[in-house]
Amino acid sequence: MIELHNVSKIYQGGGSACTALNCITLRFSAGEFAAIVGKSGSGKSTLLNMLTGIDHTSTGTVVINGTEVHTLNESDLASWRGRNIGIVFQFFQLIPTLTVIENILLAMDLVSVIPKSKRQARAENLLKQVGIDRHADQLPAALSGGEQQRAAIARALANDPPILVADEPTGNLDSVTSEVILKLFRELADSGKTVIVVTHDPSASARFERLVTLKDGRIESDQAKAVPS
């Protein structure tokens, strides 16, 4: 499903170059429940940006479901991303002037994968799935951090993408709420979605079936392991 081959990312600035990723080759299959770990500055978020097309590779290829993501222009990337990848950000990035359900409906309106007649019902079902349907008509500021993260997950799932990626999704949450979020991610992977999460939290990374560890922009280790359900 996801293939990165010899991906490098070099940032230019101040007359010098900084290599954030150095010849990364990885493959993720459908239904994987994987974490990308490493110290700050190891290249985790940059790698996630390569997977989602948020940033472009300096060299190398990114192929997802047969699409050469690295070759797409910005307009085509936005359309492709909306149909194929749901993104959950650390700081939620919900639109503060829209209600929770309006945030989800907007995601569907922008891509038009879901028929208009089915969007309201789908948004309501997604909020029920993540356990915050009672907050549908509230603004994000009225919700706790954990509730906002659940809303962000519902929005990421709005167009039923086969891939869900998350950047430090439990970084600002307490341990109990973090466990709820990770359990939800596990259920999504069990349903067939590919779930890839960037995290620096050892207790969170222990929940995943595969750990890709980065160090100085390179893959230090890539291991599969058994985890409790």
Image (tube, grey):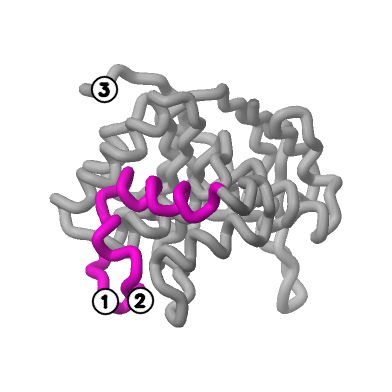
In the visual, does 47 lie left or right of 132? right
Tell me the quarter of the picture where residue 218 sits.
top right
Residue under circle 3?
Answer: 227
Q: Amino acid at mark 2?
A: Leu
Query: Viewed as shown, does residue 97 lie left or right of 113?
Result: left
Amino acid of disc 1: Ala
Cα separation, mark 3 vs mark 1, equals 35 Å
* Quadrant of res 28: top right
Q: What residue is pinned by disc 1?
A: 142
Q: Position of residue 32 (x, y in %)?
A: 47, 26
Q: Secondary structure at mark 3?
A: loop
Residue at the farthest bottom position: 97
Q: Earlier in the sequence, mark 3 or mark 1?
A: 1
Residue shown at 34% from the left, 70% from the top = 137
- Of residues 58 and 157, which is closer to you in this image? 157
The image shows residue 216, relative to residue 90, as above or below, that is above
Q: Quadrant of the C terminus?
A: top left
- The residue most toward the left is 176
Tell me residue 168's x, y (percent): 39, 54
Local crowd at mark 2 within 10 Å, few (<14), some, or many (≥20)? some
Q: Name the residue nearer the viewer: 75 or 23.
A: 75
Tell whether position 139 is magenta: yes
- Mark 3 Cα-neighbour bin, 10 Å: few <14, some 14–19, many ≥20: few
First to last magenta residue range: 118-145
Which secondary structure lies at badge 2?
loop
Rendered residue at 33%/31% (across/down): 187
In the image, residue 227 sits, relative to residue 187, either above or below, namely above
Q: Is residue 226 visible?
A: yes
**Amino acid at circle 3:** Val
